Image: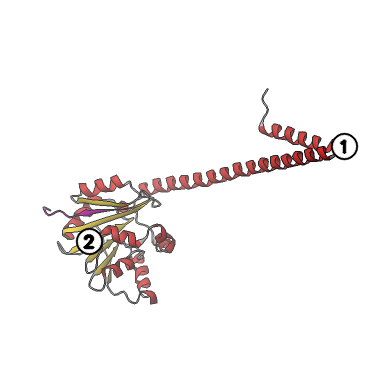
Amino acid sequence: MVINNNSSNSILINTYSSRLFKIKNINKNQLFKLFILVFNYIIFIKKFFIRKEIILTIKIILIIVGSVILFLIIFRIGAKLIRNPAPSFIGRFLDSNHRRRLQPPYKIIQASGIKKGIKALEIGCGNGAFTTFVARAVGNDGIVYALDIQPKMLEQLKNKLNRAENKDIGNIMPLLASAYDLPFPDDSLDIVYMVSVFQEIPDKNKTLKEIKRVLKTGGILSISEFFIDPDYPFRSTTVKQGTKGGFEFDGVFGNFWNYTVRFLKPVDN
């Protein structure tokens, strides 16, 4: 005979209840037994309800995790079908402290090899979520070219630079241009970096060819990716894309969720 959990729990509760209320003429021994019975009864009830709460909590967690996974799958499929840069209306999220807690600028700066006095190009700067941090890292003797194909994003960047907290920054030059046609002479830049941008570019080989042209020999190409991004690729994919584009692999930094791959422009370009 099979008894389900609910019927089993009901039988046990009824058993404890009937035994509890049938005791008469209580003496010391019976009082002690009554105490033990009540104690066991309370423990059982507590375990019964805690078990239900645990099961309910696990169900809620599974529903939340499942919903997030489903959302990411749908978002990634949509991103692969429609290759467009991040729209300007989500600029507030892109340039938020919440994002920077998950994707710290100082880690990207360290992993990319960004130093004082260099000429740096950020492709797909957006509204400058990381641009101001890089500008301070290269110092007054360096310069950061902030390039994007969306005028509205660059407008948001310019508004950001006009804020009081950014008045000390004077080495950022916003540029409206395409990654396919970079407005720089050959061998003129020390580093080109991209943060969650490279996978949004349809023709990656053409972009890498242009980056290779404008970088100095031994110059750095840095590509950073973040798991939450719908275009997120595995590290091995990014490494393969960079080396296929004619760059030398120089290292991977970070972890599965948030990483930077660094390449070098070879001497024999």
What amino acid is found at the position of numbered circle 1 in the picture? Lys
Q: Which residues are magenta?
A: 259-267
Please, is residue 229 above or below residue 43 in the view? below
**Quarter of image, res 265:** bottom left
Which residue lies under the disc numbered 1? 24
Q: Sequence-wise, which precedes: disc 2 or disc 1?
A: 1
User: What element does badge 1 sit on?
Assistant: loop
The N terminus lies in quadrant: top right
Residue 119 falls inside the magenta stretch: no
Give coordinates of residue 129: x percent, y percent: 36, 64
What amino acid is found at the position of numbered circle 2 in the picture? Ile
* Main SS category, magenta section: strand
**Quarter of image, res 138:** bottom left
Marks 2/1: CA distance? 89 Å
User: How is the structure coloured here?
Assistant: secondary structure
User: What element does badge 2 sit on?
Assistant: strand
